[in-house]
Image (cartoon, grey):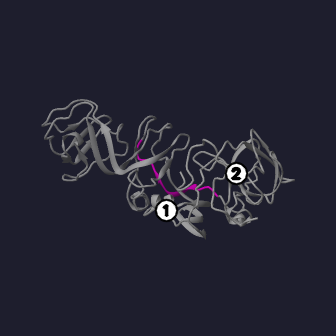
Amino acid sequence: MALWGNDDYVTRIAAGTVSLNYDTKIITGANGTQFGVTGYAKEGDVLRIGFKGSNGTYFGDATIASIESATKCTIASTEGLSGAGIAGTSFWVSELPVYTTTNPIFSENTGYNKLPPSFSTVVKTNALGQTGVGKSVIGMNGTGQVADELAWHDEGSEYPDTLLNNGGNTLKLRSLNIAYVTARFTVASGTNIIPVGFEDLPGIGTAPVGTPQISNYQEGGFFYGISGVAATTITIHDTLDAGITAGDKLKFNSERISMLTGNVSAGINTGDTLEWQRLTGGHDRYVYGVGDANVEATEGGEYQNSAGWVGVTTYHDCDGKLRVKSEILVAMSGIQTGPAGAGSTSGKGYPPV
C-alpha cells in the first residue's frame, strides 16, 4: 500500500453516498458506490467526506483499511473526522498522504483543529442622539480609542468592523466620521439653511467658522461650518454658493457621526452602548493537492504555493485579516487537484473558495 499518490480526485464519476458507524468504523455505500473497482477506490486510498466549499459541511478524511464489497469498506481510524453523524453523505476519493488522516492537526474535530473564527469586541462607546429604524447614520464620538480601533476598519478595508446592534441586525462600518444623507427639500443659493437636521444626522453638532464640516456632495465639494442644528434643518456660518435640490446627496464630516453599510432594524437611543466587533482567531488546517496549474494561478497571492501535497493553515489575525501559512508535505509534480466536493458541487479545490 503506497503512502501517497498524485491524485486528489480519483473518483471522477458519480461517487454515490456513504454512511459511517463510528463504533465499528464500517462505511456503507449507496447510490452507486464501487469500492474495490479499478479506478474507483482501493485499500489505502482516502475518503474525503462532505463538502469543503462555501456553506458546505466537511466531515474530514479517513483511510480505507479494507474493502468487503462495492458498498462496504472499513476505515483505519476516525481521528481525522469531525465526530458528527455521517449518513447519506457525498464524498470523493484521494491519494493524499495517509499519515495526515491520523495527525490531529489536520483533523476536522474541533478538539484538535477546525476552530471557526469569532467576533470579539474591540471598543465600546455611547450613542449621541437617536438613530431610527431604517436609518444608517449613527451618532458617536469618533475620537480617541474609537478612532484608534476603527480608523482602518471601515468599508474601504478588506475586513471592516461591525456594530452589534442589540435587538437588531449586525452591520458593518461604512465610514468613520463621515456620513452621506439626502436633502429633504430644495433651497436656493445664497441661503444659510441646509435641508437636513439631527433626525438625519444624530449627534451632529456646531463647529467654528472654517471647519470643513459639511460639503455639497453634488456640487463639487464646497465646505461649510455649522452654526445651528434643528430637527430637519442645519444652519451654516456662511451662505451657499450653489443651491441644493431635494434628493441631492450631501456629505458631512464630523467626529460625532459615522455611517453603517445598511439600515438598522432596531432603533438606537441617546446613551445606548455601541459595541464594535471584529472577526478574529479561528484556524483551519487542510491538506491540498496543488498542481502545476494551481501554482501559476496563485503566484503572487496569499495562497501562493509549490506543487505537491501541501498542508495549509488559515486564521484571522488581531486586525481581522486572513492569514495563510503553508507546509509542503510532499513536493512533487503531476498532482491532480481535487474539488471542494464530489460530483457537481460548486467550488474548487485550490485555492479554496
Q: Which amino acid is tagged 1?
A: Val
- Helix, strand or loop under label 2: loop
Image position, residue 112 (x, y; %): 70, 63
Q: Please determine whether, in this image, residue 265 is positioned above or below residue 61.
A: above
Q: Which amino acid is tagged 2?
A: Gly
Numbered tag placed on residue 69 in the rendering:
none
Q: State the extent of the magenta-drawn residues as a range.
A: 115-129
Q: Please determine whether, in this image, residue 122 is positioned above or below residue 232.
A: below
Image position, residue 133 (x, y; %): 46, 35
- Residue located at (87% from left, 53% from top): 24
**Residue matched to label 1:** 295
- Residue located at (58% from left, 68% from top): 332
Q: Spatial distance from mark 1 to mark 2, Cα to Cα? A: 26 Å
Numbered tag placed on residue 39 in the rendering:
2
Image position, residue 156 (x, y; %): 38, 52
Number of residue marks: 2
- Residue located at (72% from left, 64% from top): 98
Tell me where residue 157 sits by quadrant: bottom left
- Horizontal relation, residue 140 to residue 193: left or right: right
